[in-house]
Image (spheres, coloured by chain):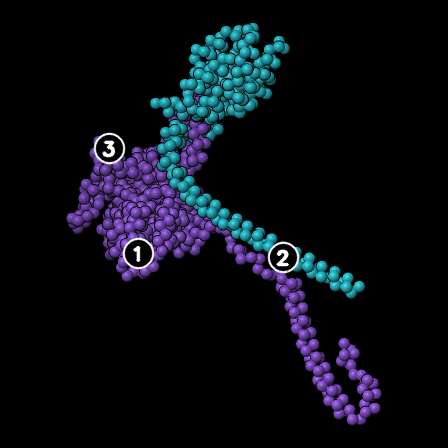
Chain colours: A purple, B cyan
Amino acid sequence: MIRLFGRHPETYTDQDAGDPGTLHIEGVRKRAIETGRTRLIVTGAMFTLAFCVIAGRMVDVTMLKGVSAKPSYQTRSTDLEIDRADIVDRNGVLLATSLPSVSLYAHPREIVDKAEAAEKVARVLPDINAAELRTKLQGDRAFLYLRRNLTPKQEYAINALGIPGLYFEKTEKRVYPQSELAAHVVGLTDLDNKGIAGIEKTFENELMARRDPLRLSIDIRVQTILRNELAKTVADFHAIGATGMVMDVTTGELLALVSLPDYNPNNLASATPVAMFNRATLGVYEMGSTFKLFNTAAALDAGTATLTSTYDVMHRIKVARFEIYDYHPENHPLTVAEILKVSSNIGSARMALDLGVENQKAFLTRVGLTRPAAVELPEIGAPLVPNPWREINSMTISYGHGMAVSPLHMMTGVSALVNGGIFHPATLLKHDPDQPIPGQRVLKPETSKVMRDLMRMVVTEGTGGKAAVPGYEVGGKTGTAEKNGAGGYHHKSLLSSFIATFPTSNPRYLVLAMIDEPQGTKESYGFATAGWTAAPAVGRVIAEIGPLLGIVPTPELSDREKDKARVATDASGKSHREVTFAKAE
Amino acid sequence: MMRAATILWAALAAVAGTGLFMLKYEVQAQEQRLSGLRKDIMEAQEQIHVLKAEWSYLNEPARLREQAERHLGLHPLKPSQITTIAALPMRDPTVPDAVSGEATPPAVPVPQAPQVSRRAPQPGMPALQTPRQVPAVRPPVAPLPAPSRPARSMTAGVTVPAPGGAPAAGAPQKAPQPKGTALAQTKSAPPVRTAAVKPVPKPTVKPATPQKPAPAPVPAAGPQTYAKAPVQPQNNGNVMVIKSPALAEPEVASTRVRP
């Protein structure tokens, strides 16, 4: 290299000295050589530079940036991709899920022989009319759904036909494994998997966004028991419908919500407007005597009455054209406790007069009866509140007429009366134990205690005797309202309801049953009132869900004696086994 | 020198090139396998998803309840069935005697425990027999055929002549009887479950008889009513605090199926 580019004057000087004539020539040659050398240097430099760049880049790629290279094109997760998340109950039982399915659609313009295609498809899918399909295909539509949710066999058969212009689309089908059991809670979706009722509608966007299942507060076992008992009551008393709920009074979670008649969400055709009507949350009713609980609590809490205050119930109250009277008039003044026990309208009205309109209004607002209930359902009924709220309204509201609320209002309101005085908004989502429970004090704890004792008394000695369950201290209140229709109140169409809490010493759950237009039967001696229809149903529900929810029964003395005798004689192994099986279920 | 280095470098380059080439193809193959596995996982997950839905459908509480009531005789738990340990009465020593009066209590319960696992009788039997029976000849004879029977059901024909030949020994005589009962049982009761129950009566009969020196009562009981054999352990089971559900359930099921 050095020799190539270096100057070598001695090689030329010898020749130059000998022949001056060649000087010019030498000069020209030398210049050419110089030019060549210069070019070589430039080219060499370029190459060196290029190699340096390449070397540098190699170091860069292999050592500096090599680590961050993409491993492969398959880095996506292997989790199953579902468009719409599942809905499960509080124990993880599936209530709604999306199953993969295939839909068949056509681009009619790509089909060569439309008549033949229609005939072939109709042969594979018997419920498609060939002639109808042909006219559809021959129309000028560019896109046509032929059939949704094909079975795998049908898909194979269609594929085997080999008709160009027919395509399959991978879709999802919303499936409700529990059928009608929780229909009014879960709701349903339309053909395009859009929620159109219930939780499916409320959480439409969230269900599409989330991956893990949405966990509801519903307990499917409690739901089953409640639905069975309500359906039995509806059948026994030839009622037109019923609704019921079970609520955890410490959190406001709804463990069951049933509205009959219901529908099968797997079958859109069964979802008629009547069946889809949610009596528990959308329907507002004049609840009748169960409202006396609020009236009593308000009077006791405000101090306008004490447990020993007495009211005259012997004389009917006449206000304008209204007359307030009792079904079973008493001929002596009643105390507050007795008024609730025998469910006296007159007494309640007089208590309301003492309480005052403003106090009553404020109290009912506090327990949430004057605004739409807050629950995660789109079907929410706004209460019908009198406006203006006069004294006569106040008197009728005291025993549950003149103001219509949904059964859910009753649940949230009464739960605040019995749980120590904290109002928890109802919820259908399982409560996260780490989160604080939203609540608001609306009642003094002492008043709540008194209310529990009064409700217990209604069951032990009052109108709710048929709801008694040996072992569980059930406390409740009956309510039989006459339905208000065209031409005033109907004496024959009743709304019988019973709301109960258990165990009254430390309430955990609140159960409501409301029967719409029950007819008296021979077994009930012709009565269709709450004490004969709703109360026994609530009693049966409590007897079944109590052990299920882990409420330890408190046997009364006589019961304990009976138990002792039974355990001694009976095979002890049997009951043990049944306990374990019930748990396993 | 120069040439050797060139050859060395060329060889190294060739080796590196080949290695890289093979590595690349290996990686490709692995990635293909990976994508195949991923696809399988996806398919399996899809199937699991569908099966979950079916599981949930089949576990519908109303259906489970109906099935449990029909096939298992179970009913919803009543509040009166729940009690605390403190509320239980103290054990009355006279009660168990009254129920299981026919045999001495210790002998009967012990063989019952091994019944649950079919092979278990083998260790249990010698333990029982050796202390009670003085003659050394009998214990070896009795335990030997015994283990083979419960384990391989009733078909073992070889064992029959061996015990049958000994007229004096009480154990051999009993051995054929259970077989007869077992065969009769299979004829009358078709379900396979009875096979599982069959080993149960055999051990119970055997230990019971060695205690009594006279072999006569046992053969009489066997042929007359084989049904007594399964009943006996059941009575004892009620006396026992620990009760195996496997004992009672097949019987409940079979009686329910017949009508």
Based on the displayed image, in which of its 4 quarters is residue A139 positioned? bottom left
Disc 2 designates what residue? B21
Asked if B75 appears above or below A151 in the picture, the reply is above
Q: Crowdedness of circle 2 by 10 Å Cα count: few (<14), some, many (20+)? A: few
Amino acid type of the residue that numbered disc 1 sits on in the rendered structure: Asp
Q: Quadrant of the C terminus of chain B?
A: top left
Amino acid type of the residue that numbered disc 3 sits on in the rendered structure: Ser
Is the same chain shared between marks 1 and 3? Answer: yes
Q: Earlier in the sequence, mark 1 or mark 3?
A: 1
Amino acid type of the residue that numbered disc 2 sits on in the rendered structure: Phe
Q: Residue B224 location in percent, x, y?
A: 43, 11
Identify the mark at residue A524; answer none if there is no mark: 3
Q: Crowdedness of circle 3 by 10 Å Cα count: few (<14), some, many (20+)? A: some
Q: Identify the secondary structure beneath mark 3.
A: loop
**Mark 1 to mark 3 CA distance (whole Å):** 70 Å
Q: Check contact, mark 2 vs mark 1: CB within 8 A.
A: no
Closer to the camera, A174 or A318?
A174
